Image (cartoon, grey):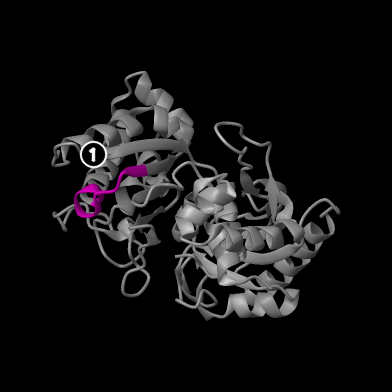
Amino acid sequence: MLSSGHYQILSVLSRSGAKSRTELAVELGLSKAAISALVRDLLDQDILSEQDPVYGAGRPSVPLVVRANAASFIGISLQDDPAVVVLTDLHGTTLNRIEVPRLADPEACVALLVKTIKTLRASLGKERGTLSGIGLALPGFVARDRQTCLACTALGWRNIKVGATLAERTGLPVWVENDAKALILGEQLFGPLKGSPDFSMIFVSHGIGCAHIVNGRLLWGNAGGAGEISHAPITVDAQKALPCRCGNRGCLETVASLLAIGNAARQAGLPTNTRDLTRLAAEGHADALSILHRAGSAMGIATAQLIQMLDPSHVVVMLDPALKEGVYGHALQYEAESHILHRTNAHTMINFRDFEPDSFARGAASLAARYFIFGHGGV
């Protein structure tokens, strides 16, 4: 059983990297004797390990790190079909993965996931840590208790207690979260921006997702909808605006998502594949240029609005590689930078990354890892 002092040490090492006992004592405001006792416990439980001593003036210091194989976790993404289920270590590295059909029937879905988790669990070798928890990410609204899916249009779910059911069937603790929120929580714990207290993430897929870390914490909102830019209006001309699946018209998703791009390309008699469409645009095809430029510009304006409201240090945009390098990505960058009120000594970096479906499953695994490291959700 770990105490609050143990979790404080794990939290510092996970967020900041290797530190010596002396550095931990200074940062946490504890005595060296107290830190030494807590560290000894964590070393005895194989949660921490010591690195090679660092020599300098005085006694050498011994950096401490969290062991990757101290524990393992399951991450499940229902963001797309097929669903992705991964097994990760405590550093967020994928050890194994399985794809399964994404089933809309809750009972059938849980039954298949239980079977898949059993398979992954059996693949754990003796050198890997005990399976300590499960995280599940889905495209919809999730209750604050991280157990109940309140609404998921893609699966037709409403008030489905998927977390509690999965926990009962596996005997493991389970946490459920919206896909974009799981994605940014994974970035905060394991990604390059884990030291940044204020950043946002956007992903562009068939839909568009977005989430924010503000002052080091996940921005939730009144009902869990903070960051839902997919259904933010991007046009004021309601007569010409396209209808959205949410029931409104002119939402960002109707212009800038892969689904919207594919629909526009189909109506123009062009390939719906983003790579082919981007190639045509690069060759000067007018309709392909227009579709991608309009979509990227809309996404850029939405990104600028996000930056104006939240002032993050970074906005990470996950895109299909073809969109990132082509007209869409260039229009996004240009419009975002053109519509930002520039401030002295302040600049938001927009970073493009390739869209990787496994990122959602790894983000889901981080939900469980946070409880192992912090003793709570850490958000």
Q: Quadrant location of residue 269?
A: top left
Q: Is residue 89 above or below residue 268?
A: below
- Picture coordinates of residue 177 (x, y %)? 50, 66
- Picture coordinates of residue 174 (x, y %)? 62, 71
Q: Residue at x 39, y 46 (%)?
A: 263
Q: Is residue 21 left or right of residue 217?
A: right
Question: What span is colored magenta in the figure?
Answer: 306-315
The foreground one among 353 and 192 is: 192
**Residue 221 magenta-drawn?**
no
Q: Is residue 247 above or below residue 66?
A: below
Residue farthest toward the front in the current orientation of the protein: 58
Q: Residue at x 53, y 53 (%)?
A: 24
Q: Residue at x 65, y 79 (%)?
A: 165
Q: Residue at x 54, y 45 (%)?
A: 17
Q: Amino acid at mark 1?
A: Ala
Q: Is residue 186 visible?
A: no
Residue farthest toward the top in the current orientation of the protein: 283
Q: Is residue 43 visible?
A: yes
In the picture, the quarter occupied by the N terminus is bottom right
- Picture coordinates of residue 138 (x, y %)? 52, 63
- Picture coordinates of residue 344 (x, y %)? 14, 37
How many marks overall?
1
The foreground one among 99 and 281 is: 99
- For label 1, the residue is 336
The foreground one among 305 and 346 is: 346
Q: Quadrant location of residue 224?
A: bottom left
Q: Is residue 249 left or right of residue 177?
A: left
Badge 1 local density, few (<14 within 10 Å), some, or many (20+)?
many
